[in-house]
Image (cartoon, coloured by chain):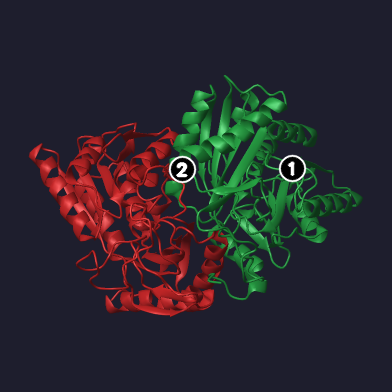
Chain colours: A red, B green
Amino acid sequence: MKKIINKPEDVVEEMLHGLALANPAVKHSKGLGVISRKEKSEKVGVVSGGGSGHEPAHAGYVGKGMLDAAVAGNVFSSPDPERIREGIDQANGGKGVLLVIKNYSGDYMNFTMAADLAEMDDIEVDYVMVKDDVAVEDSTYSTGRRGIAGTVFVHKIAGAKAEAGASLPEVKAAAEKAIKYLRSMGMSMSACTIPAVGKPGFTLNENEIEVGMGIHGEPGISKEEMKESGEIAKILLDKILDDYEASGIEMKGTEVALMVNGLGATPLMELYILNGDVQAYLEEKGIKVYRTFVGNYMTALEMAGCSLTLMRLDDELKELLDAPSEAPAFRI
Amino acid sequence: MKKIINKPEDVVEEMLHGLALANPAVKHSKGLGVISRKEKSEKVGVVSGGGSGHEPAHAGYVGKGMLDAAVAGNVFSSPDPERIREGIDQANGGKGVLLVIKNYSGDYMNFTMAADLAEMDDIEVDYVMVKDDVAVEDSTYSTGRRGIAGTVFVHKIAGAKAEAGASLPEVKAAAEKAIKYLRSMGMSMSACTIPAVGKPGFTLNENEIEVGMGIHGEPGISKEEMKESGEIAKILLDKILDDYEASGIEMKGTEVALMVNGLGATPLMELYILNGDVQAYLEEKGIKVYRTFVGNYMTALEMAGCSLTLMRLDDELKELLDAPSEAPAFRI
C-alpha cells in the first residue's frame, strides 16, 4: 500500500487538521471529526457527513452558502451519534438544523439518533435522505438506493435556501425537491484500499470495469469490458433517463444541472472527454444542460472511475444553484 | 490501458471541447488547441500552455484575473508555434502579451518562435521562463531546471497584475518576482500512460517511490522506499529550503504561499494529511504560511504522487495572489 499517510488509525483526524489549515473560514473540532464554519449566523443550519474517504465530501462543502458543518466518521464508516450531535451544535444558530443524509443504514441510524439527542436539548432538527444512485435498489450497506455524488447538489440547494433566510420546513422542502429530481449512476475501473486494511477490497481484471459500483466498492450491476467514453456516457445516461421515465418525470425539453464526477484517481482529462460525450447525448435526447460541474466531488479514495448526476431544474432550483457559495470545493 | 477516452489521437481536442462546455466564459478554437476568454479587454494579455496531460493546467486557469488564453499541445508534447500564435491573437487586446513558459526545450523553442511571428505582425510580446523544480539541474526535456506546479502561481501573479491595468514590462516584472521567490519539488508513487502509447513509461516497485520525478515521468534524484507523510514533507521541504539558502534568499520570519499539489491519482485525503505535516515543519523553521492551496493543480495524467511549492511573499505578491480570479481551477 503506497499512501501519503502516517499511522492508518490517524488518517481522518490528520486529514481534517490539514483541511482546516488550508481554509481559514472553518474550524476543526479535534477528536470529534467535525469541520464547521467559524462565523455563525442566525439562519437554519445545514449539516451533512458520513464515512471518510469521499473527499472533498463532506468537509470541503462547508462554507457560506452551503454546509454549516460536516461530520466525518472513519474511512467508509458512519460517524457515531455523539460526533453528529457536535456537528448539530456547531451549526445551530437558533433556527433549527437540517441534516442531509446519504442513504446508508449506518448513516441513517446515527444521524437520526443524533437528531433525537439534539431535540432532547430543544434544538429543532429535521432531515432528508439522498438516494440518487439508480444502479441498484438495495445494496451491501443500504436498504433502498444509495446516496452518492448527487448529494453535493442537495448540499448546495439546502445551503442556498438556508442562506436566503428560509425556515427549516422551507429548507427541507427545497432539499426534497432537489432529491426528487436527482439521479446518478457510476462505474469503476479499479479498486481502492482502506488505509487500516492495507489491501484492495476487490479486484477488477486488466480490461474490466464495473457498472453501477458504489462509492465504497459495493457491487454494481455488471462487470463488463472497458468501453470508449461515448459508450460509457450512453450506458450511464440511459439507465438514469429510464429511471426518470419510470418515475413519471418528463425530461425532454427540460434543463438540468450536470455533474461529471471523478472517483479519485481518474484524471480531469478523462472527465472532460466524458463530459463532451454526455452533453452530445443529452442534446440528442432534447435535454438542455443549464450548468456543468466536472471534477472530483464525491470520491472513493483512489478508485478510478466516474459517476454522472443529473438534477432537473425549475426556476427555484436554478436560482439556488447559482447563488454564491464560498465552500472551497464548490465555489460559485 | 483503462482510460475514459475514445480514440487516443483525439484526446486533446475532445478534452478541450468538454472543458469549454463546462465553462461558458471561455471558447475553444477547434483544431488549434486554444482555450481563451470570450470577453476581450484592452489590458495586457497573459498566455501559457504546453503539452497536455497536466489538467487543469493550463486551460483551467483561463479566466478573469488569470490567463487570457491557454495553448495545448499533444500529451506531454509542446504545442507548435502556429497554435501559440493563435493563442497570442486571442489574448491580444492591443497592449501586448506576456507568455508564461515552463522551462522545457520544446516549449521554449515553440513559444519564442510564436513570439517572433507575432512581433512580425506588430504585436508586442514578451515572456518569462518558470524553472521552479529544485530536484535536478538539467533533465530529459530541459536545459536547466524544469517548470512544474509553481507555474500556476506565476499565472495568478501575472494575471492579477495585468487585470490591474499594468503595462507589459510591469506584468513581466511581477511574474519575474514571483519566479525569483518560487521553489517546488515533487515525488511520485506510480507511472502514467500516454494514451497513444498505451503502456506506462516506466515502473516503480511495490513499495518504491521516486523523489524529484518530473511531471512527464522524467527521472528524479533517487528511488526510495515508501515513507510516512511526515518524512515526505521533510525530504521535499529540506531540498526546497536548502535551495533558497543557496540562492541567498532568507526564509525565516517570512510569509509564503504554499501549494500541496496532487499529480492526478492521489486522493485529497492524502494531500490534506501531507499539508498538516508540511505546515508543522514550516512552523518549526519559522516560516509563516499566508495562504494554502491543496489540490490537483499540475498533474501528470494518472500519476500518483505530489509536489510542494513555496512562493515567498512581499506586500505586492500578497495583493496579487489575493486578487479575484474567475478561472475555474483557481477561484479566489
Is label 2 in a helix, a strand or a loop?
A: loop
Nearer the observer, B138 or B61: B138
In the image, taking residue A58 as reference, residue B189 lies left or right, namely right
Q: Earlier in the sequence, mark 1 or mark 2?
A: 1
- Of the residues shown, which amino acid type is indicated by label 2? Glu
* Depicted A103 relative to depicted B153: above or below: below
- Of the residues shown, which amino acid type is indicated by label 1? Arg
Q: Which picture quadrant has residue A244? A: bottom left
* Depicted A275 relative to depicted B150: above or below: below
- The single residue placed furthest to the right in the displayed view is B120
Residue B145 is labelled as: 1
Chain of the residue under the numbered disc 2 shown in the image: B
- The single residue placed furthest to the top in the displayed view is B253
Residue A187: where, in percent of width, then height?
A: 41, 70
Q: Residue at x 78, y 52 (%)?
A: B107
Residue A216: where, in percent of width, then height?
A: 33, 62
Q: Quadrant of the N terminus of chain B?
A: bottom right
Q: Which residue is mark 2?
A: B228
Q: Is there any visible trace of residue B297 in the rendered image?
A: no
In the image, taking residue B155 as reference, residue A283 lies left or right, namely left
Chain of the residue under the numbered disc 1 shown in the image: B
Is label 1 in a helix, a strand or a loop?
A: loop
Mark 1 and mark 2 residues within 8 Å of each other at the beta carbon: no
Q: For label 2, count other residues whose C-alpha is less than 10 Å away and answer few (under 14), some (14-19) or many (20+).
A: some
